[in-house]
Image (cartoon, grey):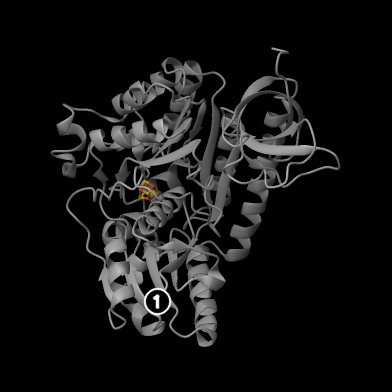
Amino acid sequence: MDKTFHIVTFGCQMNVGDSDWLARALVSRGWRQTPEQDAWLFVVNTCSVRDKPEQKVYSELGRLAAYQRKKPGLTAAVGGCVAQQIGRGFFERFPFVRLVFGSDGIAAAPDALDRLAEDASARIALLEFLGAYPERQDVLTLPGAVTPAFDADAGAPDADVPGKPAQAFVNIMQGCDNFCAYCIVPYTRGRQKSRAPEAVLDECRTRVEQGAREITLLGQNVNSYGLDPTATGTGADAAGGLGFAELLRQVAAIPGLLRLRFTTSHPKDIDPAVIRAFGELENLCPALHLPLQAGSDAVLKRMGRKYDRARYLAIVADLRAARPDLALTTDLIVGFPGEGEDDFLQTLDMMELVRFESSFSFRYSDRPGVAAQRMQPKVPDAVGQERLLRLQSLQNGITKQTLKALEGRETDVLLEAMSRRQDEGETFWRGRDPGGRVVNVRMPGERMPGADIAGSPLCGQMVPVRILEAKNHSLLAELCWGKR
Ligand code: SF4
């Protein structure tokens, strides 16, 4: 049997990073990543934060079931949040699923997949939560580690393809202890477990040595890094009280690292030292995703968010004092149980007050087992949908205005790939400015065949640009070498 695999990824940046690691680990063991028609093994890495991504998992497995009838022997593994929830249930519903692994189980998934390849009768479930951060095999320095390509995401914040040499995504923790009333993460990813600072720093140094110019530190709530009880011997204790602010400083000091970002932050845990870091660390990008979720104090309280409007606005004021050009983005939920029109208007009011550059907004949906599932009254679908449209329309207007204000400015863009936009005789490359905004850069010369692959010399280049025009959700720019 040819050890070939194909990975489909749903969900957040952490899932994308997990798939990246798994692909590298498999390749380092002699597996080959292929297009789906050539693959023996399908790995479906799942997300259940919202209802829609979960439905996508079932529809993907349904599609594979039909495919399997034409290609007997096809094997699937299901990982991530839905796997943690449904577990062995997948074995019954989809007989070709032979491995399920949760967030902590992924570290052992490559061994398990090797076993499946050798033993046609094996079925394995890796669903236990471990007591400490499950450190994974270091695949960065292994020969044969590749840049995998991914097929899908569920529209989560900034779920770009990682693994390109210029951009690296590094996990610093796993799980969450907050139990926000609507959120399934503490049940599917487990309690918070901080990764040892030495392991984080080693991975960051290796990534930079391998060509990374930008690193994004990942975690469900990075601001509480090192504060969990499982940080004993790792996290806080091992580094003499090293918390997130100090970790940021140590990563920022790695020679050759041009840009540093992190996600996601919980407002209740953001430390003044982290806020100060935005004004002090030159390579810490002026961009922060700070989930607000709702603008009404009553709703925030029912959500269990542990901050109110005043506290959130005070944090924003401090952040902007430290870094006036900070680009703030957020997550918002509309139609949370009990949300009245007045509550919703307060969410719109917060959008106006903070002027988020963009936001990810969703209609509340019940997730199994969370506290909000039992809360009443539920907001009717039609009302929730209408509120979502109003909120998104307001956001679109603010986004346009904030992008418009950047026209004529000069900045730097880290090029990621060739843009979808290509005009006759002109080549455009897509990248991001320090604020994380998508910028399409007009390049001189003819379109270069194959230039959209990660190996192109343009991929990963930092280029100076002038912003020509604001589009609805992105910027158009030209190179300005020698003009600055
Ligand atoms: S902080 Fe709240 S919303 Fe974020 S992962 Fe934890 S429980 Fe979920």
State the residue lying farthest toward the right: 424
* The N terminus: image quadrant: bottom left
* The C terminus: image quadrant: top right
Residue 1 position (above or below residue 316): below
87 or 180: nearer the eye?
87
168 or 119: nearer the eye?
119
SS state under label 1: loop
Residue located at (37% from left, 48% from top): 143
How far from the left and from the top, in percent, is residue 251? 35, 27
Q: Hey, which quadrant is residue 410 in on the image?
A: top right
Q: Hey, which quadrant is residue 239 in on the image?
A: top left
Residue beneath disc 1: 1
Residue 419 shown left or right of residue 304 in the figure: right
The amino acid type of the residue labelled 1 equals Met
* Number of numbered discs overlaid on the protein picture: 1
Residue labelled 1 has its Cβ within 8 Å of some atom of ligand 1: no
Residue 107 shown left or right of residue 257 in the figure: left
1 or 330: nearer the eye?
1
Residue 124 position (above or below residue 335): below
How far from the left and from the top, in percent, is residue 198? 24, 33
Residue located at (48% from left, 28% from top): 313
| Residue 355 in view of the camera | yes
Residue located at (77% from left, 41% from top): 447
Q: Residues within 10 Å of mark 1 (few under 14, many from 20)?
A: few
How far from the left and from the top, in percent, is residue 310? 44, 30
How far from the left and from the top, in percent, is residue 328? 54, 32
| Residue 368 in view of the camera | no
